[in-house]
Amino acid sequence: MTRPIVVGYTATPAGADAIAVASRLAAALSTSLELIMVAPLTARGGVVPPLDGYTDHIREQSRQWLREASALVPEGIPTAAHVRPAESFAEGLSNAAAEFGASHIVIGAANSGTFGRHRLGSVANDLLNSSDVPVVLAPAGYAGVTTPITRFTAALGERIGADVLLDEAVGLAKATGAELRLLSLVAIDMPASLDTQALHLAGTSHADEILEQAKQALPADVKTEAIIASGSSVEDAVARLDWSDGEVVIVGSSRLAQPRRLFLGSTASKMLRVLPVPMIVVPRTRNESN
């Protein structure tokens, strides 16, 4: 069995979405789930230390919610549930990932996210600035999707050299038997006065070069296709693509990130606005302890 997957659970629709996405990933990887509810150390607003009785009540309520959460996991997927105290939800999940040697952390969209779309809240933003393992973002309303994972789409950036991203994509494709699609975006967000046609042709040529170099680095036993998505903007280019229910997108952390940490770049942020499928964000460099 591969390393387990940590699921950040809240007793909300977003928590159910996270379990649904994590369950599909666990089933594909033949691994287990660790459901985590974080009990804040600064309960009651942190004005005064919480009373022992209040803390016990919060933790018992969390255990009840986790029992309900465990019932959402399909049969056949080994699952354990834990309440972990921490100063923040993101800290609790990061600590749990380190404790269990997790391969991924899965979280749902922020409350009021549009159905089938992503919305980053404070927990996601904190994780995307601190985690040293890949973070999986579940779209709102994904709890009803049970389709097995059939394809990973790796979104390559403008610069050649995405070894960590490709390693993650290839590893997942080989472990699950899913197909791999390499995606390069060509988006023209320029004033109308510029020669955008010439810029588009130059961008397409550069995208071809990136995709070709990436394909050459892939093993022959991974079924791969490479495509270029064009549009007037990143959002337009992404919206034009076909996305299946069995799809998961993989993006690399921005080059602005610290080593072995995450930072969501502007292109990935724009993709999230229209992306209807889960996204995995991979740290810029691997954690040597993994």
Image (tube, helix red, strand yellow):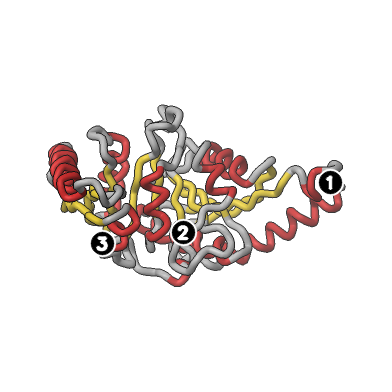
Label 2 packing within 10 angstroms: few (<14), some (14-19), many (20+)? many
In the rendered structure, which disc, 1 or 3, sits on the residue that comes first in sequence? 1
Label 3 packing within 10 angstroms: few (<14), some (14-19), many (20+)? few
Q: What is the number of the mark on residue 157?
A: none
> Quick one: 2 or 243, which is closer to the camera?
243
Contact (Cβ within 8 Å) of mark 3 with mark 2 = no
In the rendered structure, which disc, 2 or 1, sits on the residue that comes first in sequence? 1
Camera-nearest label, 2 or 1: 2
> Quick one: 205 or 64, which is closer to the camera?
205
Q: Position of residue 114 (x, y in %)?
A: 49, 66
Amino acid type, label 2: His
Q: Quadrant of residue 283?
A: top left
Q: Position of residue 112 (x, y in %)?
A: 57, 65
In the rendered structure, which disc, 3 or 2, sits on the residue that comes first in sequence? 2
Q: What is the quadrant of the C terminus in the image?
A: top left
> Quick one: 30 or 6, which is closer to the camera?
6
Q: Residue furthest front?
A: 193
The residues bearing labels 2 and 1 have C-alpha atoms spaced at a distance of 34 Å
The residues bearing labels 3 and 2 have C-alpha atoms spaced at a distance of 17 Å
Q: What is the number of the mark on residue 118?
A: 2
Label 1 packing within 10 angstroms: few (<14), some (14-19), many (20+)? some
Check disc 3 and report the residue beneath it. 241
* SS for callout 3: loop
Amino acid type, label 3: Leu
Amino acid type, label 1: Pro
Camera-nearest label, 1 or 3: 3
Check disc 1 and report the residue beneath it. 50
- Residue at x 25% of width, y 44% of height: 170
Would residue 79 be seen by someone viewing this image from the given angle? yes
- Residue at x 35% of width, y 53% of height: 29
Contact (Cβ within 8 Å) of mark 1 with mark 3 = no
